[in-house]
Amino acid sequence: MDLRTSVEQFPGIGPARAKKLAKLGIETVGDILRNFPRDYEDRRTETSIGRAGEEQPVCIRAMVAKPPRLSRIRRGLDLVKVDVVDHSGLAQITYFNQSYRKDSLQVGKEYIFYGRVERQGRAVRMTNPVTEPADRQATTGCILPVYPLTAGITNNIMVNLARWAVDGCAHLWQETLPADIVERSDLMDCTAALRGIHFPNDFEQLERAKHRMIFEELFYLTAGLALLKDRRTNVAGPVCRCPSLQPYLDLLPFAPTEAQLRVMEQCRADMASGRPMNRLVQGDVGSGKTVVAAAAGWIAVQSGLQAALMAPTELLAAQHFKTLSNLLAPAGVRVGLLTGSMSAAQKRQVQEQIKTGEIQFVVGTHALFSKGVEFDQLGLVVADEQHRFGVEQRAALNAKGASPHVLVMSATPIPRTLALMVYGDLDVSIIDQMPAGRLPIDTFVVGEDKRQRMYGFVRRLVGEGRQVYMVCPTVEENPAAGMEGLPDLKAVTTYAKTLAEDVFADLRVAFVHGKLKAKEKEAVMAAFVAGDIDVLVSTTVIEVGVDVPNAALMIVENAERFGLSQLHQLRGRVGRGKHQSYCVLVTASHSDSVKERLGVMRATNDGFKIAEADLRQRGPGDFFGSRQHGLPQLHVADLAGDMAVLEQARLAAHNLLARDPGLSDPAHRAVRERVHALFAEQADIFN
Ligand code: ADP
Ligand code: MG
């Protein structure tokens, strides 16, 4: 038996079960070893009948005192009752629909019963406990691993398989981490870690085993990202010759902030370097990322290349198209728009213009990735608000040009340690400065009792010529809302109707949500931008990027339903002009955790601080859990609280690569193979 032995060699696994296991990605002994438990159940506590508490499940060692009694209650329901004793007393055990227990439990024999104890007066009862002969304990008296399962595969099967694999083959697992790293980082060796992660003797051992596995995984990941970055710097990129940004800066209606200037200069240097730029620009909402994107586009076009800007929604694409046309058309740049909702004829025409190079700077949605789109000379790809983009899509567009420059814009601030992981292969620029003259947004958290006052406030602001957003968590009302404990959520359609007909009958109220047709959405947004709508009721479709400087109030209904980073994005829709702006978070919740969460919004306008708070409250799982970042799936999924390991693993990987940049030393062959295997499945994603 070795690591490649098929699971079918295990007694009890026939072709049918093997197929089910394959669904879990398990075909060989090696796969079993690499299939880590998702949780653990502490079944070590053994106690006596007399002392067993009711809070936690426990193991009781007791003897069957009398023959078990089977009774049929009705069709499909029978029960076996049996009395068991130990030195401290008697317990009555009931099994539902386990009639075989009548014959399998032997009088006078000792068993372990694991489960929760119930006490009624003097009586002690257990229902459906896990039951094992005391001399053959397999799943009791230990910390039991709990594995991911699929229909037809029980945890017992998995535990037995794991035991078989660990006992037979854990020692065959080859150590791939270099010995000096294992030693210097004080890691468990891989065999001990495999044993420890499947069948830990105690939680301390489990922690050490997990630590080793997480370290290993992050080590290969960071090493891989670093290698990708190196590989990229060895590829030739389009050279953009642009001696000065001044002609572009002269087009701007305002003076750029120092931060914007710095990032634009970084892009200029990247694009002139002869290597493809691969840069992430992080800037809080409203920090002015669009003009940076436009600068890069302008540089590309000056150099005779085409630029493409991808936006996550039609709304944003249309807005960017307008902004870029206004800004760049006077300089002779031909800007175009391509979105999914355009007619086939329109699309064909734009595609033709992209192909001939007549359009120099094209803005679009994912329609930019479709097959029909060919570029004449694609030199730059900008992805706006990239957290909404599949990384695959980015790659698809990249593939349309020969190693084009890539600029990724993100308004989701990611704490530094995480950013290093997620964007390890990108250079990062941060726009850490807001345009001058912005007034901080005043934020309030209010309950239902303030609703009328809030409406009054809306009326006052509209009277002053401002516009207002009202965001709701849902589109349509659930007919059962408010009943049977279902949350009473504000729905865009009904709420907008109430507002338009009753509350603000004299104001111009409209609504927009994701279920509307693109054309309808656009029409409403266009009207809002033009100032023809006073109050816009919407879902989070307006969350990203929409820019209406005259909007001065953001109201979020059922604010407790939104994540902090999302609330921050929503709030960023206001405070973009010269007017004092406000954000009102409405919640009927009295829960302390909600108050604390929303309190963070009151306390700071700083997106990075808010992201840190979000990270503390929800853990990094959210960042790693989504495949949006295009990172290889991590097996040791639960990274919460593992920021320290992350840093440790990253340093170790970087030290190793500093010593042996290509991992060509024969001693590092195993490392090289692991890294390549890790990225093999999605080799084209990081380019
Ligand atoms: P975001 O970073 O959220 O994408 P935008 O690029 O949409 O921000 O910019 C927000 C608003 O600020 C826009 O109306 C833009 O014209 C304006 N703006 C950008 N940079 C400056 C600046 N340096 N001075 C004044 N206004 C600016
Ligand atoms: Mg933006």
Image: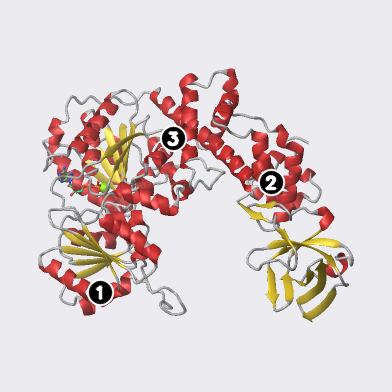
CA–CA distance in space, label 3 to label 2 = 41 Å
Which numbered disc, 3 or 1, marks the residue closer to the eye? 1
Tag 3–tag 2 contact (CB < 8 Å): no
Looking at marks 2 and 1 on the same chain, the residue that comes earlier in the sequence is marked by: 2
Q: Residue type at mark 2?
A: Asn
* Whole-percent x, y for residue 655 in the image: 47, 25
Marker disc for residue 686: 3
Left/right of residue 131 with respect to residue 632 in the rendered view: right
Q: Are marks 3 and 1 in contact (CB under 8 Å)?
A: no
Residue assigned mark 2: 201
Q: Amino acid at mark 3?
A: Phe
Q: Up-down: is 435 above or below 76?
A: above
> How busy is the neighbourhood of tag 3: few (under 14 within 10 Å), some, or many (20 plus)?
many
| Rendering quarter of residue 349 | top left
On residue 451, the disc is 1
Sooner in the amino-acid sequence: mark 3 or mark 2:
2
